[in-house]
Amino acid sequence: MFKAPIALFLLGLLSTASQSALSQDLTAPGSDEDYLIKYAIYSSAWNVSSNAGLRIVAQNQSEHNVVLQSVLFQDEDDPSIQRRLPLNMEVPAGKWAEKEIDYLNLLFGSECISRTMAEEWKLVEISNYTLNPSVRGLIIENSDSFRIYQCVRTVRVSWLDTETNEQNDHNEWVMYHFERQYTN
């Protein structure tokens, strides 16, 4: 399909984005303070019955090699319900990395995600960036053929700067990017 080339194109566009340092505070994707490590998560299992796993594509916009260790997803109502996405993914400075892992359900613990899936929207990707932050939570008509919708949730990301041995653990937002055919 076209998802991977489109995602790589979109991530390529992001490489020209601001490369400001990460703060320990929660930062909105697409805001003036962008993340140094950008990633997107894909799975065909979200939309069809399959044994497909998860595919992760990451871009390191920092000047040091890093290991993207994990992303922790928590239930919005009960933080004790959580799933850690184990990555241990080496991402060279200024480069891309890709990894496939076994499927892990990341669709739990969010009213927005549950409602959107129940309304038969197709989940396209989960990522910590968006090209247009104004579309969060809003339906927009992108063309005459389909609509897009995004849900936002907070995750805890862990990564290691392998050159300085600095451990980075911080909260950030991820976007669940949905789409569906437009019908009159």
Image (cartoon, rainbow, N blue to C red):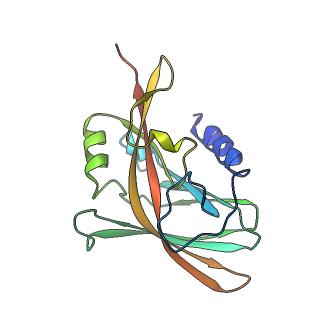
Quarter holding the N terminus is: top right
In the figure, 147 relative to 10: above or below? above
Q: Residue furthest front?
A: 32
In the figure, 160 relative to 180: above or below? below
Residue 47 is situated, as x and y percent measured from the top left of the image, at 38, 39
Q: Residue furthest bottom?
A: 165
Horizontal relation, residue 103 to residue 57: left or right: left
Horizontal relation, residue 32 to residue 106: left or right: right
Q: Residue at x 41, y 50 (%)?
A: 51
Q: From where the camera sits, is residue 52 visible? A: no
Residue 169 is situated, as x and y percent measured from the top left of the image, at 51, 77
Quarter holding the C terminus is: top left
Q: Residue at x 25, y 42 (%)?
A: 115
Q: Residue furthest top?
A: 184
Horizontal relation, residue 4 to residue 123: left or right: right
Residue 105 is situated, as x and y percent measured from the top left of the image, at 35, 57
Q: Quadrant of residue 109?
A: bottom left
Q: Residue at x 49, y 73 (%)?
A: 170
Q: From where the camera sits, is residue 75 visible? A: yes
Q: Nearer the viewer, residue 143 or 117?
A: 143
Q: Quadrant of residue 33?
A: bottom right
